[in-house]
Image: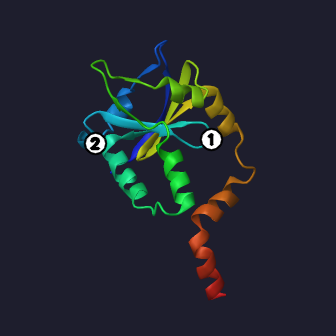
């Protein structure tokens, strides 16, 4: 499993290609074979997965019971726009126009790498997202990361 880390400022060329930063390329699992899948993410970004990671996530999604309406809706939205990409000889990826339009991407973008994915953001959208930081990040961290301890703490009292 990949464990990406980092933020990388990039530029899209007029054809919609981005140069994969060397710092990210070094973090790629050789099993990905420089193949990726990109799809729509949350909050108007795109999500780029190494192909081997996508295969695992896709297998989990495909286990959902398709006789349940919410599952079918999720599956459709999850796969909507999913496109396989391959690094070209110069280390560039061609982002699908339909997806860059969805994410309102202009020339300047940010690659935000974490866990097994790389989020692709329009730079202004990304900066606006980060300036909208919660007033009490410590409280949010406790709610998200300390949630399992709340029940334990209540049992001890």
Q: Quadrant of residue 94?
A: top left
**Which of the pair 124/6 is nearer the observer?**
124
Dot 2 falls on a residue whose secondary structure is loop
Image colouring: rainbow
| Quadrant in the picture for the C terminus | bottom right
- Reading the image, the residue beneath label 2 is 29
Q: Position of residue 38 (x, y in %)?
A: 43, 36
Q: Position of residue 154 (x, y in %)?
A: 66, 83
Residues tagged 2 and 1 counted as in contact (Cβ below 8 A): no
The residue that appears at 51% across and 47% down in the rendered structure is: 76
Q: Which residue lies most toward the front here? A: 67
**In-image side of 62 versus 80 (left or right):** left
Q: Quadrant of residue 136?
A: bottom right
Dot 1 falls on a residue whose secondary structure is loop
The residue that appears at 35% across and 40% down in the rendered structure is: 50
Q: Position of residue 90 (x, y in %)?
A: 30, 18
**Which of the pair 103/141 is nearer the observer?**
103
Q: Is residue 85 above or below residue 91?
A: below
Q: How many marks?
A: 2
Residue 42 seen by the camera: yes
Query: Would you call the spot at circle 2 few (<14 residues within 10 Å), some (14-19), or many (20 or more)?
Result: some
Residue 2 seen by the camera: no
- Reading the image, the residue beneath label 1 is 43
The residue that appears at 49% across and 19% down in the rendered structure is: 12
**In-image side of 33 versus 100 (left or right):** left
Q: Kindly report which numbered mark, 2 or 1, lies closer to the viewer in this rendering.
A: 1
The residue that appears at 61% across and 62% down in the rendered structure is: 144
Query: Would you call the spot at circle 1 few (<14 residues within 10 Å), some (14-19), or many (20 or more)?
Result: few
């Amino acid at each position: 499993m990949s464990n990406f880390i980092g933020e990388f400022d990039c530029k899209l060329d007029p054809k919609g290609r981005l140069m994969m930063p060397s710092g990210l390329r070094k973090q790629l699992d050789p099993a990905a074979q420089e193949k990726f899948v990109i799809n729509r993410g949350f909050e108007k970004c795109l999500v780029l997965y190494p192909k081997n990671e996508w295969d695992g996530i896709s297998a989990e999604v495909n286990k959902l019971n398709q006789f349940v309406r919410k599952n079918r809706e999720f599956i459709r939205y999850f796969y909507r726009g999913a496109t396989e990409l391959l690094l070209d000889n110069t280390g560039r990826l061609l982002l699908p126009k339909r997806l860059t339009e969805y994410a309102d991407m202009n020339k300047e973008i940010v690659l935000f790498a974490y866990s097994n994915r790389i989020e692709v953001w329009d730079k202004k959208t990304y900066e606006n997202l980060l300036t909208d930081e919660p007033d009490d990040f410590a409280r949010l961290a406790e709610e998200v990361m300390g949630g399992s301890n709340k029940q334990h703490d209540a049992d001890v009292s």
